[in-house]
Amino acid sequence: MVWEVVAVVALVLMALFFLPRFLRSGVATVPEYLEIRFDRQTGIICNLLFLVAYAVILLPIILYTGAAGLSSILDIKSLFGFSSDTAALWTMVWGIGIVGSVYALFGGLRTVAVSDTLNGIGLLTGGFLIVYFGLNAISGGNGMVAGIEEITADLPGKFNSIGGNSQEVPFGTIFSGVLLINVFYWCTNQQIIQRTFGASSLAEGQKGVLLTGFLKLFGPLYLVLPGLIAFYMVKHGIIDIGLKSSGLPNSDLAYGTLVKHVLPGPLTGFFAAVMVGAILSSFNSALNSTCTLFSLGLYKELVCKRASETQVVASGKIFGWLIAFIAMTIAPLLGNTGSIFNYLQTMNGIYFIPILAVVLVGMLTNRVPAVAARWALVAGVAVIATGYFVPPFNLVVASIQSYHFLGLVFLYLILFMLVMGAVKPRREEFVQQDVHAVNMKPWKFAPAAGVAMLIAVVVIYVCFADFSILK
């Protein structure tokens, strides 16, 4: 729930603070903005971080979760007579990866945006249908209200919006790593915000971002509640999601198994089709971002500065196929992780935190030099990776909670850059120029809409809060 609801805070920040600054510079990528604010080397480092992270973290996770979900919905193992779940997973991963690559590399950003819109409508519709049929199944056909009463009585602790100290996301982490990761994801993550860079005006971009925030307010209903329904059904032996090699329940299959169990046959087919589209859209947008980052940020800047537009596009497509191959090879191996969602958020922190720190300092200051930004990017990644994987530092990080660790690294990176700005400032103050790429007149209702959504976030948390868990 925390990832869904706190995302609204980040989206309000995107609409009111980040988006105007990006659009004023007329950039197509986040590294391009950092190149304007700092220098070319800073942009190249940021570019490389995005490319490596997308290839080994984001794209494989999209493929794995999509393949696992579809396999459980459609029972791919039985349908095609595979001898093992692993064979079914590999087949689904490569099938989705190849189809998605063709779509992304030949369709471009416009097709990704259109398909995302259509799939988003389908996912919202399907998500609410799963809640309806799931609660009805729990109540034995006596309706949603009876289902809610049954599940809340059986799992009272699961409906607390406050995470205890022993849980994966304790309450205090909302104000450190969780908030920072959300702000990066919705405000500076190339894969997500590239759509807003194509806005026809600042006002239209703000409307789209705030509409996304409004829909995120319903995340606890269409995304979190189905998880609780699945938990109830697994607990009572109504559905079986199997076990991972570690012996823990295979929660990665919970959603797909729930869909197959509660939806009527025709609706299962509809939702499976929507899932395919959504998976392809997520994979496509990430792959499209990767191609854009490489072709404009590296190929055009370093390899062939005089390249024609045709050559730039071709370089992106070739690189896209290479990245897709790497992602399809890594994806099936993720089945050995614990919670795939927490794995995603933890791994993302390695590059999320340094990039967000540099972007924020770049937007809020005008004297911090490029050398500070470059060192912050490199040192931030090195420190977080060391804290995650190198003994005995990883034991220290585990003792203070990984999200608090990310918050501390973020704070130190900010302080380092501010000190560098005071000790060795730029010769001239940075002044952001309006390149007049789009109409910069803001939507007049944007501040009011943002405040209303922030109030809604607080109200949602208070309604489900039981602070006694912190004692």
Image (spheres, rainbow, N blue to C red):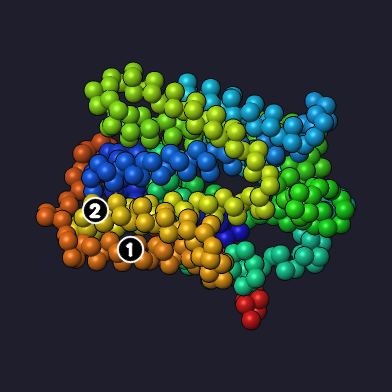
Marks 2 and 1, how far apart in space?
14 Å
Task: Name the side, left or right, on which 87 lies relative to 312.
Answer: right
Q: Which residue is at a point 61% across and 38% down the rendered structure image?
A: 331
Tag shown at residue 371: 2
Residue 330 percent coordinates (x, y): 59, 37
Q: Secondary structure at mark 2?
A: helix
Please say if 411 is above or below 340: below
The quarter of the picture where the N terminus appears is: bottom right
Q: Residue furthest bottom?
A: 471
Query: What residue sits right under mark 1 in the picture?
Result: 414
- Dividing the picture into quarters, in which one does residue 63 lie? top right
x, y percent for residue 107: 47, 23
In front of the other: 273 or 385: 385
Q: Position of residue 397 (x, y in %)?
A: 52, 66
Q: Given the current orientation, which residue lies at the most extreme left position?
A: 427
Residues 230 and 92: in front is: 92
Mark 1 surroundings within 10 Å by alpha-carbon count, few (fewer than 14), some (14 through 19), many (20 or more): many
